[in-house]
Amino acid sequence: MRLITALPLLAGLMLSTNLMAADTAAKTPSPAQAAQQKRMTDCNQQASTKSLKGADRSTFMSTCLKSEGSSAAGKTLTPQQQKMKNCNADAKSKNLKGDERKTFMSGCLKKSA
């Protein structure tokens, strides 16, 4: 009787162990995660080189990670993003608000670039 209950439990345990091993082996960081990890490592090394501790280190790490990220954010805009930027600037220069702004933006974005 013990054998009948122990066999399915043993089989279940072996199956779950195999599934967990396969799941952990398949996890590799995405390119964005890998870039973030590299940024974090570089900033951490710089902070260690400068012997920063406590609040000074936190502030340095924050600014370091932001400055590294902003260089990637400075990429060229897509045509749609550029059109949106131009229409927003035009609407702001005309001091449009509410429904007027909405109507203007709609018409501006529908125009061909």
Image (cartoon, grey):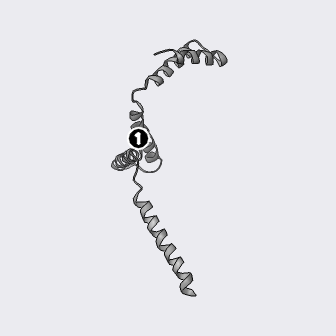
- For residue 70, which quarter of the picture? top left
- Residue at screen point 56% across, 87% down: 2
**In this rendering, is residue 44 above or below 7?**
above
- For residue 31, which quarter of the picture? top left
**In this rendering, is residue 47 above or below 100?**
below
Residue at numbered disc 1: 64
Indicate the position of residue 15 as horizontal and vertical percent values.
47, 70
Secondary-structure class at tag 1: helix
Find the residue positioned furthest to the top.
94
Indicate the position of residue 10 as horizontal and vertical percent values.
50, 78
Looking at the image, residue 83 sits to the left or right of residue 34; the answer is: right
Between 32 and 52, the residue placed more toward the observer is: 32
Question: What is the tally of numbered marks visible in this picture?
Answer: 1
- Residue at screen point 42% across, 43% down: 60
Find the residue positioned furthest to the right.
99
Locate the N terminus by quadrant: bottom right
Between 6 and 28, the residue placed more toward the observer is: 6
- Residue at screen point 66% across, 19% down: 98
Locate the C terminus by quadrant: top left
Indicate the position of residue 38 as horizontal and vertical percent values.
36, 47
Find the residue positioned furthest to the bottom.
1
Q: Amino acid at mark 1?
A: Cys
Looking at the image, residue 35 sits to the left or right of residue 86; the answer is: left
Which class describes the residues within 10 Å of circle 1: few (<14), some (14-19), or many (20+)? some
